[in-house]
Amino acid sequence: MRIFDHPSFSDHEQVVFVADREAGLRGIIAVHNTVRGPALGGCRIWPYRDESEAVADVLRLSLGMTYKGAMADLPFGGGKMVVIADSATEKTPALLHAIGTAVDRMQGRYITGEDVGTTSDDMAEIAKKTDKVLGLPPSLGGSGDPSPSTARGCFAGIKASIQHLTGADDLSGATVAVQGLGHVGWRLCELLAGAGAVLVVTDIRPETVAKAAARFGARTVAPEEIYDVPADIFAPCALGAVLNDDTVPRLKMRMVAGSANNQLAAPTHAEMLRDRGILYAPDYVINAGGLIQLAGEYFGFGREELDRRLAGIGNTLLQVFETAQARGLSTHEAADRLAEQRLKREPAPTAQPSPERVDADGSRG
Ligand code: NAD
């Protein structure tokens, strides 16, 4: 397997293979860029078919974290860890401790957190071996589930998007088609309904869909029909690659603004959206609320600072939309260019971690 000329290799600073035979650890930590600060990104436990699949994932995901941190204006770079294992059957305390040891050996250049296949409780296990871990349970001084912050950041992004189109950020009477009623989607529905939006929802879990109909007075559609709904806004909050050759021509909405990661099947779909006159809020900009919450856990943001930064997602998006318009770019490309500009600037001053963190053994520090 080749790394330096791998299609997803993008001048990553460090790619480290880690192993512990007894604990069953086979993993890779990729530090993409630390210009703005230590590389932050979750630890994904996934039964990859082989090493090359894991390498492709860790290279791509760590690069994405660099761009996400830069656009959220956080003093963090981009990193990620992937572990080749089935989280349902192979995730043992020993494996989590070995992950913690591997993270600790990075000497602060990489900070880990939750991702697919890991939970807040797993972070508490990992924290027994390293303090370079975020997303701890509130009982250990962590910030807990990041989804409410992701939903709030997404809501701020939807308001900014409608403001860009209409000049006012008023959502009352606007129809929003929400795909996915999970941790983020459900909370987003609460915020949208509270702002007077009319909801059309879907999910693959019929009982959740029925609950949303009762709770929000939402109209419900089958999962495959959500792309054809006449609405003002499409909010994808379920899967990746939902903006593709099949769906983009079908959309009747004026804008796409939702929390899902990797919404574009390919960058060309951002251009297709632009050419159809549909405003696209780049996913990694609008869904940064969870990352902002983790930064708050690290630096000890108060409520006000967290609120200010989540609301700031709206302002960042307005800047992206204006840049795209001025330079004739897709909004996706405009976001990438802005992130790259931020990466060329002087590093953000390194703030100190909050002294309020409680270590896994119960001590503060
Ligand atoms: P979740 O697993 O809690 O919810 C996803 C929901 O989508 C589930 O209810 C699921 O049944 C539904 N779903 C799955 N396939 C579907 C389909 N084909 N059609 C309609 N619904 C479908 O996940 P989440 O934490 O709410 O995250 C949602 C999205 O936002 C994911 O793409 C995630 O990567 C992204 N995201 C989440 C966070 C966060 O803080 N949780 C942060 C950044 C990005």
Image (spheres, helix red, strand yellow):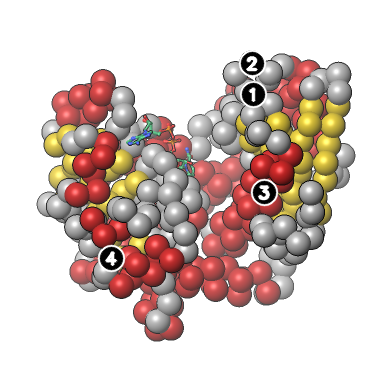
Q: CA distance from mark 4 to mark 2?
A: 43 Å
**SS type, badge 3:** helix
Q: CA distance from mark 1 to mark 3?
A: 18 Å
Residue 62 is left or right of residue 361, and the answer is left
Q: Amino acid at mark 2?
A: Thr
Q: Residue at x 30, y 53 (%)?
A: 247
Question: Mark 4 sits on what residue?
Answer: 278
Other residues around mark 1 within 10 Å, as few (<14) / some (14–19) / many (≥20) = few
Image marks 2 and 1: residues in contact by CB distance under 8 Å: yes
Q: CA distance from mark 1 to mark 4?
A: 39 Å
Is 46 placed above or below 316 here? Answer: above
Q: Amino acid at mark 1?
A: Asp
Is the distance from the Cβ of mark 2 to the nearest ligand 1 atom less than 8 Å?
Answer: no
Give the quarter the ligand 1 occupies.
Answer: top left
Residue 318 is left or right of residue 73, and the answer is left
Q: Is residue 11 visible?
A: yes
Q: Position of residue 260 (x, y in %)?
A: 43, 46
Is 141 placed above or below 82 here? Answer: above
Residue 204 is left or right of residue 358, and the answer is left
Q: Quadrant of residue 279?
A: bottom left
Question: Mark 3 sits on what residue?
Answer: 56
Q: Position of residue 315 (x, y in %)?
A: 41, 65
Question: Mark 2 sits on what residue?
Answer: 89
**SS type, badge 4:** loop
Is 237 placed above or below 347 here? Answer: above
Query: Mark 1 or mark 3, which has the lower sequence index?
Result: 3
Query: Mark 4 or mark 2, which has the lower sequence index?
Result: 2
Q: Position of residue 340 (x, y in %)?
A: 61, 71
